């Protein structure tokens, strides 16, 4: 029997729609790259030309060697990795508990965590500033990690909980019947199956922390503790904006995110748990 | 191998009591099947034996040692799950050897035991596959292999065949029976399928509504059910039960038919008469207890099921061996085998059985 194939026009339509979406989504990225490689003197004369009339690496060179960009970059990396690690660790523990145990106050804790997600960040900027200032932690990267972690935990916990919910309880019980303690069952059976979930959570939190501007702007004012998004603003001076260098810095900032996703994408592949239970 | 004892065991979730006062002794090497409808508590009871579910009341012993609070790993019992619960990231060999890996047994011993189990179960060619590359039946075998490898004190099975298709189910049922014969291990098996129960069990425990209804060998349950629930649950096609009243040694049915039983006492309390389809004979008109009209005939090849409508009494099913030449619409004369007649009181309990008294 012939396979039921969709109409060629419908197929073409699907691809056109996808292409349009991709163009829409990727155009800003392309523009970032285009400006970054356009010589300064041509930025305004080239205007909206899709292809620059001359190429240069000057912007990258000056960003890397004449500005504090590398320091910002390092700070951002430290903050983002720290936040991703701390958040994922805590969220994995909390998500596991929410998924597997019933305990007093569970519903209330979940409700409170949900409530924290409802406030616009602007509302709590001032109190957070006061708290951090009282601890004497202004201008420290640790304070950023603490604040980012606190903000990302609820969502990351829900994410991890849904991953744990997707792993059949039978597997853990089978492991315990096989002689594991609960912790061994978690480590040897559940943990390897949660890698996609951990990967997704790490990726999500890393990206969120990497591009966060608001808190970084509030809590960091010293140049040597600036993260990359705050550092980007230094390209905006009183009288002009250094577009070329700013875009070059932006392109460089994309690299860690991309690398990170290249690294975790194999854990993001679903279907690892198929075959565990009935077929 | 182990002896398992439950004394007054209960299970409560808050104020809801799902199992009450369960007394059960499982002998060394015995094959016990827990059977009952959905929600009767049979799986919960099994999980309590496994240690996966806390015991709310009573005492639980393995080989005379009280084990109420022992964790699953301390009980040394293997369990085969309904979902198989194979570890998806481990290949077949590692799945089967996992319990020995956890117990830090020497790799050489592990390998040889896994190899032996794989051979027994016909899995030798598959030891390097991941569970997702196996068929349902193969997964089932791996799950059994995982239990065998560790040589536990007892085996628990939680509806292990319910995800398989009919043919495979029969095959695996045989496999489990063989396994029990070969290992001589204590096994507790949960199912809602009475054929599995009747074919596998040394003794069957019938559960309903959190209570044990009856414990006995398959034949005892079939021939002398303790109450109407067991009578109707065990046996396929199910037992005919019709309203009846009793006086002296005679039961009266709704259409006025009188059936004299060899039973001596207790018939005053009779509320219903039960008779299995295979215990109704077709006879000449003058010997008949009941006369009816054939409503429907099912030819199964080996048997013929005849649905007979009998006025006020209602519908009776009669089962004949072989291919009986009976057509629907036909008038038919029935006689109940006296020694195989069951009488139930209004609370459902069986009154003293005819054949029991005759014996």
Image (tube, helix red, strand yellow):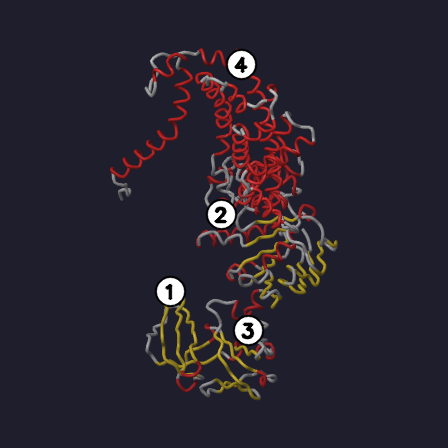
The answer to which quarter of the image holds residue A142 is: top right
Q: Image point 58% across, 68% down: which residue?
A: B220
Question: Which chain does tag 1 point to?
Answer: B
Q: Secondary structure at mark 2?
A: loop
| Residue B170 image offset from top left, x and y in percent | 47, 54
Residue position marked by numbered label 1 in the rendering: B301
Question: Which chain does tag 3 point to?
Answer: B
Q: Answer whether labels 2 and 1 touch (C-beta < 8 Å).
A: no
**Badge 4 and badge 3 in a common chain:** no
| Callout in the foreground (2, 1) | 2
Per the model, the C-alpha gap separating discs 3 and 1 is: 30 Å
View extreme (right): residue: B65
> Around disc 2, counting alpha carbons within 10 Å, would you say few (fewer than 14), some (14 to 19), or many (20 or more)?
some
Find residue A67 and name its label: 4
Q: Nearer the viewer, residue A66 or B171?
A: A66
> Around disc 1, counting alpha carbons within 10 Å, would you say few (fewer than 14), some (14 to 19), or many (20 or more)?
few
State which tag comes first along the sequence, 2 or 4: 4
Q: Answer whether labels 4 and 3 touch (C-beta < 8 Å).
A: no
Per the model, the C-alpha gap separating discs 2 and 1 is: 34 Å
> Around disc 3, counting alpha carbons within 10 Å, would you say few (fewer than 14), some (14 to 19), or many (20 or more)?
many
Q: Image point 61% across, 84% down: which residue?
A: B265
Residue position marked by numbered label 3 in the rendering: B228
| Callout in the foreground (2, 3) | 2
| Residue B356 image offset from top left, x and y in percent | 60, 76
The answer to which quarter of the image holds residue B352 is: bottom right
Question: Which chain does tag 2 point to?
Answer: A
**Badge 4 and badge 1 in a common chain:** no
Residue position marked by numbered label 2 in the rendering: A278
């Amino acid at each position: 029997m012939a396979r039921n194939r969709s109409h060629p026009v419908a197929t073409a339509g699907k691809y056109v729609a996808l292409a349009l979406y991709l163009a829409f989504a990727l155009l800003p990225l392309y523009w970032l790259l285009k400006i970054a490689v356009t010589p300064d003197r041509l930025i305004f004369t080239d205007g909206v030309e899709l292809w620059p009339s001359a190429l240069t690496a000057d912007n990258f060179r000056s960003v890397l060697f004449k500005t504090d960009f590398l320091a910002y970059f390092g700070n951002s990396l430290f903050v983002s990795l720290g936040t991703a690690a701390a958040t994922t660790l805590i969220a994995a523990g909390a998500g596991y508990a929410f998924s597997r145990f019933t305990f007093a106050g569970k519903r209330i804790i979940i409700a409170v965590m949900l409530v924290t997600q409802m406030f616009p960040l602007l509302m709590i900027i001032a109190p957070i500033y006061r708290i951090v200032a009282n601890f004497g932690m202004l201008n420290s990267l640790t304070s950023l990690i603490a604040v980012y972690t606190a903000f990302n935990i609820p969502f990351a916990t829900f994410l991890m909980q849904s991953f744990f919910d997707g792993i059949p309880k039978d597997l853990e019980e089978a492991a315990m019947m096989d002689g594991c303690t609960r912790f061994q069952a978690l480590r040897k059976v559940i943990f390897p199956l949660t890698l996609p979930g951990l990967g997704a959570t790490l990726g999500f939190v890393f990206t969120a922390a990497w591009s966060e501007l608001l808190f970084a702007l509030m809590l960091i004012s010293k140049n040597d503790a600036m993260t990359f998004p705050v550092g980007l603003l230094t390209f905006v001076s009183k009288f002009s904006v250094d577009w070329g260098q700013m875009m070059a810095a932006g392109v460089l900032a994309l690299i860690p995110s991309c690398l990170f996703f290249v690294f975790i994408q194999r854990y993001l592949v679903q279907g690892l748990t198929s075959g565990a239970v009935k077929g | 191998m182990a002896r398992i004892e439950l004394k007054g065991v209960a299970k409560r979730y808050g104020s809801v009591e799902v199992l009450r006062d369960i007394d059960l002794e499982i002998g060394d090497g015995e094959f016990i099947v827990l059977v009952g409808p959905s929600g009767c508590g049979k799986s919960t009871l099994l999980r309590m034996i496994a240690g996966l579910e806390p015991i709310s009341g009573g005492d639980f012993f393995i080989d005379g040692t009280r084990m109420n609070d022992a964790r699953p790993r301390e009980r040394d019992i293997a369990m085969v799950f309904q979902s198989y619960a194979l570890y998806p990231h481990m290949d077949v060999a590692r799945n089967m050897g996992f319990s020995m890996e956890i117990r830090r047994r020497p790799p050489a011993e592990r390998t040889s035991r896994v190899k032996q189990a794989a051979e027994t179960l016909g899995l030798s060619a598959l030891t390097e596959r991941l569970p997702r590359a196996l068929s349902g039946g193969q997964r089932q075998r791996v799950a059994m292999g995982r239990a065998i490898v560790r040589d536990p004190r007892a085996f628990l099975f939680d509806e292990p065949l319910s995800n398989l298709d009919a043919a495979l189910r029969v095959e695996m049922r045989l496999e489990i029976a063989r396994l029990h014969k070969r290992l001589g291990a204590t096994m507790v098996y949960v199912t809602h399928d009475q054929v599995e129960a009747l074919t596998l069990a040394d003794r069957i425990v019938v559960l309903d509504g959190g209570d044990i209804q009856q414990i006995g060998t398959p034949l005892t349950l079939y021939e002398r059910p303790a109450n109407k629930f067991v009578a109707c649950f065990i046996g396929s096609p199910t037992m005919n039960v019709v309203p009846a009243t009793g006086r002296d040694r005679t039961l009266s049915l709704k259409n006025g038919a009188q059936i004299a039983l060899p039973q001596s006492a207790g018939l005053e309390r009779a509320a219903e008469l039960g008779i299995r389809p295979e215990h109704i004979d077709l006879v000449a008109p003058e010997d008949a207890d009941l006369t009816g009209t054939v409503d429907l005939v099912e030819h199964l090849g080996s048997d013929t099921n005849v649905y007979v409508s009998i006025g006020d009494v209602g519908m009776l099913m009669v089962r004949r061996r072989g291919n009986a030449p009976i057509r629907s619409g036909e008038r038919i004369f029935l006689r109940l085998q006296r020694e195989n007649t069951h009488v139930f009181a209004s609370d459902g309990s069986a009154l003293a059985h005819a054949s029991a008294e005759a014996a």
